Image: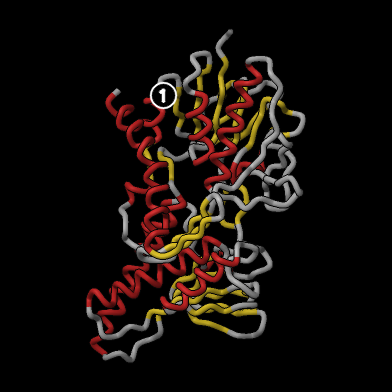
Amino acid sequence: MHSVHVVVIGGGYGGIRAIEHLAHNSHITITLIDKNPYHYMQAEVYDFIANKVDMSQVMIDLPSLTKSFGLVKFICEEVSGIDTTTSTVSTATQSIPYDYLIIATGSRTYFPDFIKGLREHTHGVKSIPAALNFKQQFERSLLNRIEAQTRGCDVEPFNIVIGGAGLSGVEIAAEMAAYANHFYQNGNFGCRGVDVYLIDAYETILFGMDPFLIESAYERLSKLGVHVWHNNRISEVRKNEILLDNEKTLDFEFMIFTGGIAASTLTQYLGFETNNKGHLIVDEHLNIPNHPNIYAIGDITQALNEEGKFIPPTAQLAERGGEHVAANILRSLKGKSKRPFQFKNQGVMIALGGEYGAGLLPGGIKVKGYVAYLIKKAIFWMYTAPLRRRSGIGKRR
């Protein structure tokens, strides 16, 4: 068998998992391209913002990781285009030929154009720089508020607003509330004054999820003092104020918008079919239609289940996609037919601030509280420990 070159664009959950499943084959060489020299574990960003972990614990060094696999090359550049006629991927400095291509560049926060001022006046956490920027500004504001106690407790309200009560919105609202509570209790500061508001467009948080998770999350948010505003849609965002469609207004110090995601901007330049949020349309094998050697996985795709319904983007979905396309590439190399992608959810774990969580495990097992928190931490450790071992090997090479 002649050597086959696989190019992977994106060193996220899906891209890394695909490499892990392909790299053991001596007939395959791999090139990973990513504009950042690190794998960002976005699913744990809330612990980073709340100072539970430092920045090194939510990232893995990609140059060291790829070196550990042997026949994997890492290019730290941004992809500018794909030429399907010559089977090459272009960056600012070079063209990289491929036999198989895996596109796994993830997603970005979706800012609807019809909400005036949303993009200009809100924070995101879908990248390390954005999360770090929010964390530093939030801590500076806490310090400013403590210093303002020279005037007594008669100071302006300090509101944090989270727009969107899906999984990300609920997790970050709980974590910010728990962090603020701990901060004031730990320092015995007299002027509390930090409030977290969760703006929910639906009649319930975690809309469409299991009732147990909804009930557990709502119970925890209430205990943490989070203000949940249901059936409220944001109509405009100003510098320190949001306007809702029912004419209510709310001042804020910080606002994070989690109301939706769009595919990474790369999809705009590829010429492949996308939906209205830029997600690539893929077939049942996760191939780009009419391009049997090009796959797309994770948040960048419009993944549908057997009923044709959109599968919510998660790290789990990206990892299963990475495993699947790797298996299909190996099957193709052996002259076997591809298999369609079938996603079976292995459970959901939600971080709910402090050492508390809720989740559904395989078999319908329900957990919440400290036990759920420990399970979530164990899952994170099982994911990161092998990668850190590998990157340690690569660093020494």
Q: Nearer the viewer, residue 3 or 253?
A: 3
Q: Nearer the viewer, residue 308 or 371?
A: 371
Q: Residue at x 39, y 86 (%)?
A: 156
Q: Is residue 303 above or below residue 353?
A: above
Q: Residue at x 41, y 84 (%)?
A: 157
The amino acid marked with disc number 1 is Phe
Q: Is residue 93 left or right of residue 184?
A: right
Q: Is residue 181 left or right of residue 96?
A: left
Q: Which residue is mark 1?
A: 69
Q: Residue at x 65, y 72 (%)?
A: 202
Which residue appears farthest toward the top when viewing the image?
1
Expressed as whole percent of the image width and height from the top left, the position of residue 269 reads 66, 40
Q: Secondary structure at mark 1?
A: helix
Q: Residue at x 49, y 41 (%)?
A: 12
Q: Is residue 157 above or below residue 314?
A: below
Expressed as whole percent of the image width and height from the top left, the position of residue 215 reads 54, 71
Expressed as whole percent of the image width and height from the top left, the position of residue 227 reads 49, 79
Quadrant for residue 111, please give it: bottom right
Q: Nearer the viewer, residue 241 or 20?
A: 20
Q: Residues within 10 Å of mark 1 (few under 14, many from 20)?
A: some
